[in-house]
Image (cartoon, helix red, strand yellow):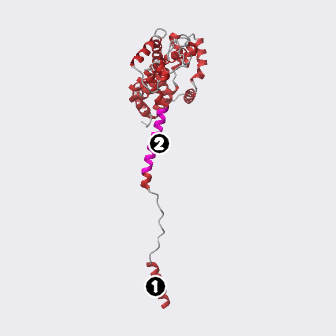
């Protein structure tokens, strides 16, 4: 009996004794990490912005300042030093007198070609994207694949077959030779396809058809008003693409009087002593005038972008949610 009582007493003491807890592991200081991460993020952001400024902003600043300098100052002065308004006006007069004011003709041609191409692009791309996204017909998937393939092809790869086709139709050296090939804009068709496939409800279009609307009326009265953001986006990208189009007009237009501004710049390059030493010191175009011509050539695109930012942002975010 005593042995059993002794055993129960030892068991009770063992149960009541405090258990030893293992030593706590050292924890990383979370507060210090929370402070370090934002600092690293800010430093990386500053580095990226500085790299962007060096490779993109500085050349634009040099262009803006280079147009205000004389030819000697452009070569000898500090690259980021400013010139004078007098030199700017002198460069402008010389630029406007180049080949009896052909620069204005080139700018007018660029505006004409770009606007006509934008109109044709919208007339083709918006209905094509709508049909590929919301209509069911034979060959739909094949057309979509062909559109994607053509979008990936470089534009120079299609210049020769386009030239042979237009030459057969006697359209070379005409406005149509520059405008018609740009009527089909694969990137615009794909943007429109994505928009209609993700942001326009098929039930809404079916309701319009049940109310008596035909396919054309459904597109023009229901789908097209809802597609204003993507229409603006396609128009902007088409305008930029057509404005910067160089190789196609260079091949199709042998006449200088029909050149757009981008092709006309090559003539100015050949008349500048820096790029063509054969012309000598009495060249028709000096480097500051060429810089000013470059600024004139990009000014319309910049203005269109500044006045259409709201529509561009709406178009870029339009296909983000299912409507």
Foreground residue among 173 and 295: 295
Label 2: element kind: helix
Q: Is residue 285 magenta?
A: no
Query: What is the number of the mark on residue 139?
Result: none
Give coordinates of residue 140: x percent, y percent: 54, 28
The residue drawn where x is 49% and y is 35% is 51
Answer few, some or many: residues within 10 Å of disc 2's Cα (few below 14, many 20 plus, some between 14 and 19). Answer: few
Image quarter where the C terminus lies is top left
**Left or right for 277, reference 15:** right
Where is residue 273 drawn, in percent x and y?
54, 16
Find residue 310 and report its image quarter.
top left
Say which of 285 and 72 sits in front: 72
Identify the residue position indicated by label 2 in the image: 44
Which comes sooner in the sequence, label 1 or label 2? 1
The answer to whether residue 50 is magenta is: yes
Q: Which residue is mark 1?
A: 9
Of 84 and 116, nearer the camera is 84
Residue 138 location, x and y as percent? 55, 28
| Residue 150 quadrant | top right
Q: Position of residue 99 (x, y in %)?
A: 49, 9
Q: SS at mark 1?
A: helix
**Residues rendered magenta in the picture:** 35-54
Magenta stretch, main secondary structure class? helix
Residue at 45% over, 40% down: 45
Neighbour class for label 1 at 10 Å: few (<14), some, many (≥20)?
A: few
Any part of residue 215 in sight: no
């Amino acid at each position: 009996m005593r042995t059993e009582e002794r055993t129960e007493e030892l068991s009770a003491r063992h149960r009541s004794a405090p258990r030893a807890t293992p030593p706590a592991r050292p924890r990383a200081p979370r507060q210090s990490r929370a402070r370090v991460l934002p600092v690293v993020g800010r430093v990386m952001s500053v580095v990226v912005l500085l790299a962007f400024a060096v490779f993109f902003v500085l050349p634009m600043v040099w262009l803006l300042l280079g147009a205000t300098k004389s030819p000697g100052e452009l070569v000898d002065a500090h690259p980021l030093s400013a010139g004078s308004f007098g030199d700017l006006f002198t460069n402008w007069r010389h630029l406007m007198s180049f080949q009896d004011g052909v620069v204005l003709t080139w700018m007018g041609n660029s505006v004409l070609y770009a606007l006509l191409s934008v109109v044709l692009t919208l007339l083709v791309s918006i209905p094509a994207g709508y049909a590929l996204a919301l209509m069911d017909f034979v060959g739909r998937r094949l057309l979509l694949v062909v559109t994607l393939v053509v979008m990936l092809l470089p534009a120079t790869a299609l210049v020769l077959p386009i030239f042979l086709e237009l030459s057969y139709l006697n359209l070379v050296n005409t406005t149509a030779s520059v405008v018609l090939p740009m009527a089909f804009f694969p990137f615009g068709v794909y943007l429109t396809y994505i928009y209609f496939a993700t942001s326009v409800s098929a039930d809404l279009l079916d309701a319009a058809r049940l109310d008596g609307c035909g396919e054309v009326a459904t597109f023009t009265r229901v789908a097209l008003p809802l597609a204003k953001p993507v229409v603006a986006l396609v128009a902007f990208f088409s305008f930029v693409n057509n404005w910067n189009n160089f190789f196609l007009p260079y091949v199709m237009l042998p006449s200088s009087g029909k050149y757009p501004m981008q092709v006309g710049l090559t003539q100015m390059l050949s008349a500048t002593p820096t790029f063509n030493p054969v012309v000598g010191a009495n060249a028709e175009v000096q480097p500051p005038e060429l810089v000013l011509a470059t600024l004139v050539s990009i000014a319309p695109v910049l203005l269109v972008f500044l006045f259409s930012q709201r529509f561009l942002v709406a178009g870029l975010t339009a296909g983000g949610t299912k409507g």
